[in-house]
């Protein structure tokens, strides 16, 4: 089932979609969205609910017609092509399995609509059910299956037609936490094996980071940043992305001096020297210093860390301990990972903190 | 379905919508307009003189108030009785067998011809009644009047309240009651402060449904009302058939229109929107909380059993009356009444079966077509189609019958004397149940199913045929069952539409009663109940074959 030869990319070119809302009035669900998905690439649209990711996906599928903009599959403009002529595989959040058809009839549906001979259909259905680990389930009905099994049927039904583009709309949100992790690995492996161009929608940043080649973060109808999981985590372009992808401390800071390869900032009562990042700053600018909780080392009172603080609260989570530490007016989240013996610092204890400054970033403007 | 926002139009949809509009215009709007015209115009000029005479007549004014009084009392008593049954069924932890038996006895009145309880009342409490004369030895009692009409209508219609209230009570999450109990409330206090308030919209709904049913009831007051207790539907009928005053009859039926419409609008657009969200979900009830004490449970059960026994007694009496020479006088067993109905009455039986057989599939089809169009398609006049399709259903049968009589008696559209007029009356009067079943089912079918089909390459026709249609088949069968049952048992509208060429069993029963041949009337009634049960069983079997495994079931629609 390797489709490598006829892989195509997807281009979303300035798509906008307006809705009239009873409270908010006329508003944009998607606003001038531009995306390029390379052939065989796995792109995830990540964002909070209402950010326009599902609308964008449904426009790509052909379930919604954009008010403006075009959608291309390869070189073909499919904007006016109805969903049933786009050759897509769509996996719905609620799976949308046909309740009156057996597992094999569900999977066979797309093939039989395409008028394939029965023998071919039976073979393809058998193959794809084996592929998703559901051999032997042919005669079951959707109502008899567990959530994870239904998810696999939905997946099999979408890929059996050898779609040009595979689309997922929050496919794992109805599964429990452990199954979610297993299924996302399976989806990723399957996509790699089949090499189908894929767009995947989720609000779960960890899921997005686990499955994607590339992630497009959306907010209020627009794409705010695109990049690999590492790019987004280490070099967020905005406070929104910084806060949405992973946990973060945003500390108010002021630029003291700008040098060629390092910027000196005044934050938490000391001067720190951090990498300049992509933005340009001048001395005296108000900025936000971005420190990830795991990039701050926490030591007892006797430690030599440059920042002094007091533990406000802590939570022992097994592989790590979360601390909330007060430094002057600022509350900092600090994570300490366990490697063997751990010494839990008690609430109210004085501590010293040492930020790993090469992992810190600066964003323009004071934190909101 | 093509996506709701995609711009292209479907010519098949447009043609179907157009055809349905033409039929609705002809069989719903046109007769109603003709009825209004007849009431308001006299020989081409606006005139109210004739109507005012009829409507200000002391006797008719009395009939109007009687109608409202009877409807209100039936509404109150029937709702109370229905609530008791529903509460017992949902909360008294009944064994399965007992529950089924209770259901069966309660549903009997809903599938019977309209005179059955009335005939049984006469047999029991009439001048030579089994109970009044033979058991109690009373002489010269009269069974006619408000009390017996009320009693008979409550027994006939309380199942409607039962059917609408039972899922409601069963749907109340019993954890809510358990919570109240754990906060220290007594069972009675929990019932009074939690259960009952949650049921109030349902009770109001049931009251209005019963009010409407009683307001429209023609058969029971005709037999049991007598001279002391005239009501509007019977007065309109007598004005037309007795005094040959079509205009006066139309005016009387018109007086019925106002309360009927008020009740319909209240029920559909006010009460039905006030159901609490908490009770629309499915009941958590795996471990139902003990909401009734054992003593209360016994009391409830005894009360329900007593009512069920009365119903069973009435039907047993009817069967017995059909098998003896003359109940109350000569109790020798005979099949003579059945011989009569299968010779003299054979034409009525054949006509009724033909008409019901025609109306059944057409009414079922009409139900799913309109239901599908108004839920899933966008076209001009969609909302008004939904409303117009409900009119004949909401109006009392007397109004519809008189309107048809006026509209189709003369050219340009002369249908009087044909089977078509009766068939059309049944389709447009009882098809709406199928519409509502279809709408309810379609609203449960997630939009994503049709999108999934489209995404897999199916066109809108294929999607309808292979996905949507199999899932609304239960609504089709539910709709056609109702049309069949009502075609076998209704009389209020069609009594105006029968002719020498086409007559109905129910009309024959009425003729027999007025001629005091109660034996054949009982035999006819038994026959109708048997036919309805046999056909229902056949449809249920068919449904098991046709019902797709994953399709959602339709809740009982007999409740209106």
Image (cartoon, coloured by chain):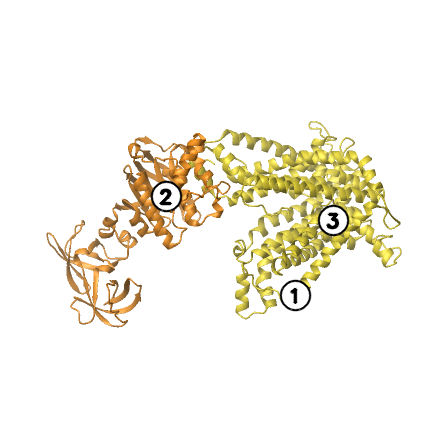
Q: Could you tell whether A210 is left or right of B456 in the image?
A: left
Q: Which residue is mark 2?
A: A168
Q: Could you tell whether A30 is left or right of A337 in the image?
A: right
In the picture as drawn, the residue positioned furthest to the left comes out as A260
- Give the residue displayed 53% in from the left and 62% down from the top: B176
Q: B262 or A9, which lies in front? A: A9
Q: B20 or A60, which lies in front? A: A60
Q: Could you tell whether B166 is left or right of B311 in the image?
A: left
Chain letter behind tag 1: B
Asked if one can make out residue B378 in the rendered structure from this viewpoint, the answer is no
How packed mark 3 is, by other alpha carbons closer than 10 Å (few <14, some 14-19, many 20 or more), is many
Kind of element beneath mark 2: strand
Chain letter behind tag 3: B
Mark 2 and mark 3 in contact (Cβ < 8 Å)?
Answer: no
Q: Which residue is mark 3?
A: B64
x and y percentages locating residue A177 in the rendered image: 37, 54
The quadrant in which residue A256 appears is bottom left
Chain letter behind tag 2: A
Q: Which residue is mark 1?
A: B296
x and y percentages locating residue B129 in the rendered image: 85, 53
In the picture as drawn, the residue positioned furthest to the front comes out as A136
Mark 3 and mark 1 in contact (Cβ < 8 Å)?
Answer: no
The quadrant in which residue A157 appears is top left
Work out how far the residue at label 1 is from the one at label 2, CA to CA, in angstroms. 55 Å
Q: Could you tell whether B61 is left or right of A274 in the image?
A: right
How packed mark 1 is, by other alpha carbons closer than 10 Å (few <14, some 14-19, many 20 or more), is few
Figure chain in yellow: B
């Amino acid at each position: 089932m390797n489709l490598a030869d006829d892989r195509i990319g997807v281009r979303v070119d300035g798509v906008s979609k307006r809705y009239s809302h009873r409270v908010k009035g006329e508003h944009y669900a998607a606003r001038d969205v531009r995306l390029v998905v390379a052939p065989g690439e796995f792109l995830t649209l990540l964002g909070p609910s209402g950010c326009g990711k599902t609308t964008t996906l449904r426009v790509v599928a052909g379930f919604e017609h954009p008010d403006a903009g075009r959608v291309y599959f390869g070189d073909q403009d499919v904007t006016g092509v109805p969903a049933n002529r786009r050759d897509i595989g769509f996996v719905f959040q609620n799976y949308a399995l046909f309740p009156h058809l057996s597992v094999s009839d569900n999977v066979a549906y797309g093939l039989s609509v395409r008028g394939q001979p029965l023998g071919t259909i039976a073979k393809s259905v058998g193959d794809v059910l084996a592929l998703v680990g559901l051999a032997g389930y042919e005669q079951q009905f959707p109502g008899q299956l567990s959530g994870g099994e239904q998810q696999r049927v939905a997946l099999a039904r979408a890929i059996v037609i050898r779609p040009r583009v595979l689309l997922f709309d929050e496919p794992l949100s109805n599964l429990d936490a452990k199954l979610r992790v297993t299924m996302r690995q399976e989806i990723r492996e399957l996509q790699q094996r089949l090499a189908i161009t894929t767009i995947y929608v989720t609000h779960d940043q960890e899921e997005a980071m686990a499955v994607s080649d590339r992630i497009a973060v959306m907010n209020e109808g627009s794409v705010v940043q695109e990049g690999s999981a590492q790019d987004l985590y280490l070099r967020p372009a905005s406070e929104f992305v910084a806060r949405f992808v992973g946990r973060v401390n945003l500390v108010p800071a002021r630029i003291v001096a700008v040098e060629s390869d390092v910027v000196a900032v005044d934050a938490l009562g000391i001067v720190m020297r951090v990498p300049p990042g992509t933005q340009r700053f001048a001395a005296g600018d108000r900025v936000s210093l971005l420190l990830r909780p795991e990039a701050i080392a926490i030591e007892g009172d006797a430690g030599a860390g440059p920042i002094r603080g007091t533990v406000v609260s802590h939570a022992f989570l097994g592989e790590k301990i979360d601390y909330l530490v007060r430094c002057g007016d600022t509350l900092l989240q600090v994570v300490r990972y366990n490697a063997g013996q751990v010494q839990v610092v008690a609430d109210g204890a004085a501590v010293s903190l040492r930020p790993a400054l090469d992992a810190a970033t600066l964003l323009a403007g004071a934190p909101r | 379905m093509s996506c709701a926002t995609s711009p292209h139009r479907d010519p098949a949809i447009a043609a179907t919508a157009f055809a349905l509009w033409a039929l609705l215009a002809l069989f719903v709007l046109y007769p109603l307009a003709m009825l209004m015209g007849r009431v308001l115009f006299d020989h081409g000029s606006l005139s109210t003189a004739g109507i005012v005479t009829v409507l200000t007549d002391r006797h008719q004014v009395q009939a109007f108030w009687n109608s409202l009084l009877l409807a209100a009392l039936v509404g109150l008593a029937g709702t109370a009785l229905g609530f008791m049954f529903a509460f017992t069924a949902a909360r008294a932890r009944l064994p399965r067998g007992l529950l089924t038996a209770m259901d069966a006895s309660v549903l009997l009145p809903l599938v019977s011809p309209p005179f059955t309880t009335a005939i049984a009342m006469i047999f029991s409490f009439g001048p030579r009644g089994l109970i009044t004369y033979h058991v109690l030895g009373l002489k010269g009692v009269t069974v006619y009047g408000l009390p017996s009409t009320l009693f008979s209508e409550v027994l006939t219609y309380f199942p409607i309240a039962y059917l609408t209230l039972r899922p409601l009570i069963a749907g109340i999450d019993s954890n809510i009651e358990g919570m109240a109990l754990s906060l220290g409330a007594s069972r009675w206090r929990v019932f009074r402060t939690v259960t009952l308030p949650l049921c109030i919209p349902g009770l109001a709904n049931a009251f209005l449904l019963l009010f409407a049913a009683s307001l429209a009831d023609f058969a029971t007051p005709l037999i049991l009302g007598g001279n002391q207790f005239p009501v509007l539907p019977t007065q309109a009928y007598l004005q037309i058939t007795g005094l040959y005053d079509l205009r006066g009859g139309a005016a009387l039926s018109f007086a019925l229109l106002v309360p009927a419409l008020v009740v319909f609008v209240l029920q559909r657009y006010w009460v039905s929107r006030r159901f609490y969200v908490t009770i629309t979900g499915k009941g958590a009830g795996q471990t139902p909380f003990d909401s009734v004490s054992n003593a209360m449970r016994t009391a409830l059960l005894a009360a329900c059993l007593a009512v069920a026994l009365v119903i069973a007694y009435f039907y047993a009496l009817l069967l017995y009356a059909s098998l003896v020479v003359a109940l109350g006088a000569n109790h020798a067993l005979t099949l003579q009444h059945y011989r009569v109905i299968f010779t003299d009455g054979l034409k009525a039986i054949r006509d009724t079966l033909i008409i019901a057989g025609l109306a059944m599939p057409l009414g079922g089809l009409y139900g799913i077509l309109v239901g599908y169009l108004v839920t899933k398609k966008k076209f001009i006049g969609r909302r008004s189609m939904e409303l117009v399709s409900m009119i004949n259903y909401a109006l009392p049968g007397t109004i519809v019958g008189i309107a048809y009589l006026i509209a189709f008696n003369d050219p340009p559209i002369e249908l009087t004397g044909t089977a078509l007029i009766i068939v059309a009356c049944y389709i447009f009067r009882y098809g709406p149940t199928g519409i509502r079943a279809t709408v309810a089912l379609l609203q449960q079918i997630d939009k994503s199913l049709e999108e999934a089909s489209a995404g897999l390459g199916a066109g809108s026709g294929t999607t309808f045929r292979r996905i949507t249609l199999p899932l609304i088949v239960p609504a089709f069968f539910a709709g056609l069952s109702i049309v069949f049952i009502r075609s076998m048992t209704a009389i209020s509208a069609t009594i105006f539409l029968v002719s020498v060429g086409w007559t109905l069993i129910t009309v024959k029963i009425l003729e027999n009663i007025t001629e005091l041949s109660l034996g054949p009337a009982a035999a006819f009634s038994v026959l109708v109940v048997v036919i309805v049960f046999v056909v229902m069983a056949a449809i249920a079997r068919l449904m098991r074959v046709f019902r797709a495994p994953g399709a959602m079931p339709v809740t009982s629609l007999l409740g209106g």
